[in-house]
Amino acid sequence: MATIEDVAKYAGLSRTTVSRVINNQPYVCDEKRERVFHAMQELGYVPNSSARRLRNQKTETIAIVLPRITNPFYSKLVEVMEKKASWWGYQVIICQTYHCAQKELHYLELLRKKQVDGLVMVAIQNEWTKVEEYIHAGPIVICNESIEEANTVIVGIDQQQAAYDATVHLIEQGCRRLAFISGEENSNLVQARYTGYMKALQEHHIPSMDDPIFHEAVDVESGQTILGKVVHMNNRIDGIFAGCDEVAAGIVYAAMKQGIRVPEDLAVVGFHNDTISRLMNPAITTIEVPIVEMAEKSIEQLIRSIEQPLRNKRESYQFAHTLLKRDSTNKRITVPM
Amino acid sequence: MATIEDVAKYAGLSRTTVSRVINNQPYVCDEKRERVFHAMQELGYVPNSSARRLRNQKTETIAIVLPRITNPFYSKLVEVMEKKASWWGYQVIICQTYHCAQKELHYLELLRKKQVDGLVMVAIQNEWTKVEEYIHAGPIVICNESIEEANTVIVGIDQQQAAYDATVHLIEQGCRRLAFISGEENSNLVQARYTGYMKALQEHHIPSMDDPIFHEAVDVESGQTILGKVVHMNNRIDGIFAGCDEVAAGIVYAAMKQGIRVPEDLAVVGFHNDTISRLMNPAITTIEVPIVEMAEKSIEQLIRSIEQPLRNKRESYQFAHTLLKRDSTNKRITVPM
C-alpha cells in the first residue's frame, strides 16, 4: 500500500509539502497541490483516517445505546437513525446493553475516550446523575425516554397519555380486571406509563390486578409465560396493557393455544405498532409511535450539537401517538361509563 | 476536562514523562509511573483514544455490511455479532446498503480509510472482483453468501440443499404448480437456492410457474402484493418457496384475507425461522438456520484475521440447516412419488 513517502517521491516534492496538502494547510501553491493530488490518485494513496480525524478532533462516528437490536421497535429506530446519520457522513456504532446499567456505562465511556462524537440513548438504565457526568465529554440525545431533570435534548411521545388512552379504551370495551405488563419496573418510561394507567383506573374506580411476573416481560416468550400464569388466577384478568407488541403477541398466541378467546375472554393492547401486531389473528390493538420522525429528529439534533456545541440545555421534542383500535380489543359492545 | 499538562502539573513531572507513561514507553521509574497514574485518576484524565489507536494502528472497530437492520434475520445476526465483538473489546458499526451496490462500496471504503479493522459482509451486491480489491486493506468475512471464487473466510449453510429440501417437501405434500419467490435475482445466494429448487422440480418432472414480480420480494408488503397477483392467475399456484419468513408471512396473511386456504389451496415455505413464522396462524414451515453459531464463527474468524493477519486464503465453515415442518404445508396427505 502506498505511503506518504511514495506520494512525495512520485510528485517530486517534500514529505512536508505532501502533508500540508493532505491536511489542507496554507503556503502551498496550486500547481504543487495538483501534483500531490495526481500522485495520490495514481498510487491509490488514501490518507489515514485516524490521523485526519485526530487532527480535527472528530471521529465522524456516533453511538446508539439500546437494550437489544432484535426488538422490532429498536431495530426500526436504528434503521432510520443509521440512514439519516449516513446521509450526514457519520458512521453508527450500535451498543446493546441488555438492560444492564454497567454495560451502559461501558458504552458511555466511548464519549470520554473520544471514540464517538456523540451518542443517542434509546433507553436508560442508570440514574440521570450518572449519565449526566458524560455530557461534558460530548452531546447525548435521549430518544423515547422521559427524564424530567435531563438538561439535554429529549425526543419522544407522551408515554403517560399513551398508557392512559390504552387503559381507557380497555375500560370502554368492558374490561374490569386489568393488568399492566412492563419490562423494567424502575425505568422512567415504565413509571410514566404506570402513572397514566393508574390514572385511568382511578377515574373509573377500578382496582389493578398486580403480580411480580408482570414486570419482567420483554419478548414473545415472556408474553407466553404471563398467559400461562393468568390462566390459573382465581379472579381472572380480562384486559391487559402490554408495554410492547412482542409481549402482546406472545399473550395472544398463548391464549389461542389455551382456548382463551381474544378479545371476548381477554382483551389485549400492545405498543409500537410492530408488523407482528398487524399480522396476528386477531390483529392487536396498539399505540402507534412516529418512529421515523423521532429517529430523524434525534439524529438531526445530535449532529447539530456535535457541529455547533451548545450543551447542558434542555430541549424537548414531543410527537403525537395514535391508538390503533383492532380486533384484540373489539368486544363489539359499548359499556355506559 | 483535564489535559496532559494538568496531569504533568499535578504529578510534578514533565509532559514528556507523562506522555511516556501513557504510551507505555521505557525509561520511566516505577515511582514516577505511579505518580502519573495517581494524577490521571485524581483528575479524571482519559488518554485520547484516537491518538492511542493511531499509535497501535488499530481502531478496535469492525463493520457489518447488510441490506437493512429491520429484517429479523439480519437483526438477529447483528445482535449476536455485536455481543461477541463487544466481549472481545471491539465496537460494531452497522452499514445498511438497501441492496445498493454503490452504497456497499462506500462502506467498504471504511477499510481503506482505516476507520475499521475488519468487516463482515452479510450480503453482497457487487461482483466479487470488486469486493476483492478491499481485502488488501483489511480482512473481510462473508456470512450467509456463497461465492465460489472468494479467497477469504466464508461462513454459511448449503443454500442449494436447503432450497432443494423445501421444494421436495412441497412436492411431497401434493403441490404441482410451484413458484420460487426471491429478493434479488442476481445474487449468488438466490442463484444457489434457485439451482436447488429447479433440481427438485426436474427430478419430479414438474414445471416452474414464473413471473417477474416473484423476484422483487423482500418484506411483508411484497408478500401481500404477490398473493394479490397469484389470486388472478389462470392456472393458480398451489405451492410457494419464499426466500424469507417476512415474505411468507405476508403471503399467508393476504391469503387469509382473500379466503384462500393455507395449506389446502396454497402451501407456503419460508426461510430463517423468524419469530413471526411461529406465531402466524397457520404457523409457517421454514428453514431453520443456526444464526448464533454462524454469527459467532464470523466474528471469531474476523478478529483472528485482524490480530494475526493471514489473508487471501479461502476458509469455509458450513453449518447444518433444518426444515421445520409446520401447518402452512401440512396437507395431511402423502402423495406417492
Image: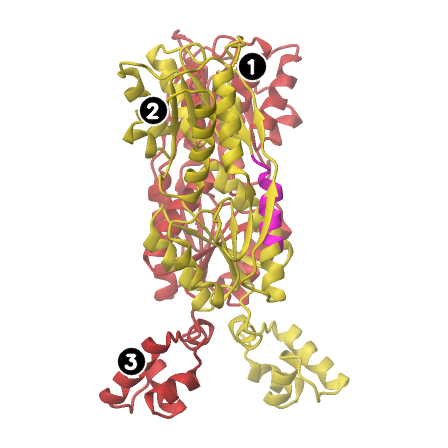
Chain colours: A yellow, B red
Q: Is label 2 or label 1 in front?
A: 2
Determine which residue is flagged by label 1.
B255
Please state which amino acid type lies under the numbered disc 3.
His
SS label for mark 2:
helix
| CB atoms of marks 2 and 1 within 8 Å | no
Q: Quadrant of residue A229?
A: top left
Residue A306 falls in image quadrant = bottom right
> What is the magenta range?
A289-300
Q: Are marks 2 and 3 on the same chain?
A: no
Q: Nearer the viewer, mark 2 or mark 3?
A: 3
Say above or below: A259 vs A81.
above
Depth check, front residue: B72 or B190: B72
Q: Which residue is mark 2?
A: A224
Instruction: Single out the mark in the foreground, 1 or 3.
Output: 3
Q: Chain of mark 1?
A: B
Q: What's the chain of the residue with tag 3? A: B
Of the two numbered discs 1 and 3 on the same chain, state the one appearing first in sequence: 3
Q: Is residue A285 above or below residue B111?
A: above
Q: Secondary structure at mark 1?
A: helix
Disc on res. B38: 3
Q: Tell me where residue B190 appears, x and y as whole percent.
A: 53, 36
Element assignment for label 3: helix
The lab-note entry on whether marks 2 and 1 share a chain reads no
The x and y percentages for residue B8 are: 38, 88
Q: Residue furthest left?
A: B30
Query: How would you classify the magenta stretch by its main secondary structure?
Result: helix
In the rendered structure, the answer to whether residue A294 lies left or right of residue A234 reads right
The residue lying toward the viewer, choosing from A54 and B179, is: A54
Q: Nearer the viewer, residue A244 or B74?
A: A244
In the image, is residue A85 above or below residue A337? below
Task: Let me know if residue B69 appears in the view.
Answer: yes
